[in-house]
Amino acid sequence: MRILYVGVFDASGHSTNTSQLLALKALGHDVVGYNYRQKAALLGTHGRDAHLCSTAHERNFDLIIFSKCNSLSRAVFEELTKVSKTCLWFMDPLSTLLQHPELLTASSVVDYFCCDKKMVFEEVLKINKNCFHVCEGYDQEMERPHNLKKVYDISFIGNVYGDRESKINQVNRPVNILNNAYGPSHSIEVSKTRINLNFCTDSGASDRVYKVMAAGGFLLTDDWAGRADKFVDGEDLVIFEGARDLNAKIEYYLKNSDERDSIAHRGLSKVQQFNRISWASKIVDLSHGIQKNA
């Protein structure tokens, strides 16, 4: 299949869109990446839009995937949907979607819409019947176990904002906050940690939960909508409810390393179905059953 992937790409291969593009190529598809932000910087927004439409017309793609693309006009989505089958991929929470009404409009224009968050799915389904939940997952090349000595009892990988700081402050033991673990270094830090913490927002879990389990880490997290459809509490990961429960489970799993390692191993096995290859396969497979919008 000839695919045009409109997103944001980097030379290092660490960005999510770059990882997804490589996964599409790994499945044997002929994929062209179009960096819509870079083109806008070079050509201006209107020049970029015209160039993108020209590219789509000239190359005769079977499928065009837009990754968020909040700066594209409705006219671009309408024009490209005329020439190819189109999919809008949106990984962010509902609050971000509602901040960009142009993306809600685009959601109704494209042939089908795929998203990572349950609340986004429920909102877009109101305006596009071809709406599907597809897990963003993790990059199987970067997120993998490393046989390293444990140096942290507890860590949180990410930036501390919102109510995360107050939650971390309620932990009785020191928490190592690692806010510069990007790309391959993320799985290294996970592998050096006995208990990896995660705090969900109202919109659900980030890709951190998949990345931690894919690196063979033991994940201790609060719950999120749709979790039970993918992972079993106490088998693949461990769910806590409130500060008292969090501290109790930290103490328990620090003392019971065999049980902790067993859960981490099962989580590693379960999460394999949510890698980038799986994401790419689902996005493409869904296109085959979609009828073109009029």
Image (tube, rainbow, N blue to C red):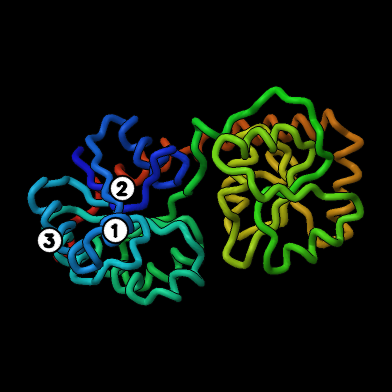
The local secondary structure at tag 3 comes to helix
The image's mark for residue 49 is: none
- Is 196 situated left or right of 268 in this image? right
Count of numbered marks: 3
The image's mark for residue 112 is: 1
Mark 1 or 3: in front is 3
Q: On the image, numbered disc 3 is attached to which residue?
A: 82
The local secondary structure at tag 1 comes to strand
Q: On the image, numbered disc 2 is attached to which residue?
A: 286
* Residue 263, quarter of the rendered image: top right
Residue in view at x 73 percent, y 25 percent: 148
Mark 3 or 2: in front is 3
Camera-nearest residue between 190 and 123:
190
Q: Could you tell me which quadrant the C terminus lies in?
A: bottom left
Q: Determine contact: label 2, label 1, CB under 8 Å.
A: yes
Rounded to the nearest angstrom, the CA distance separating label 2 from label 1 is: 8 Å
Residue in view at x 36 percent, y 36 percent: 22
Amino acid at pointer 2: Leu
The local secondary structure at tag 2 comes to helix
Q: Determine contact: label 3, label 2, CB under 8 Å.
A: no
Q: Earlier in the sequence, mark 3 or mark 2?
A: 3
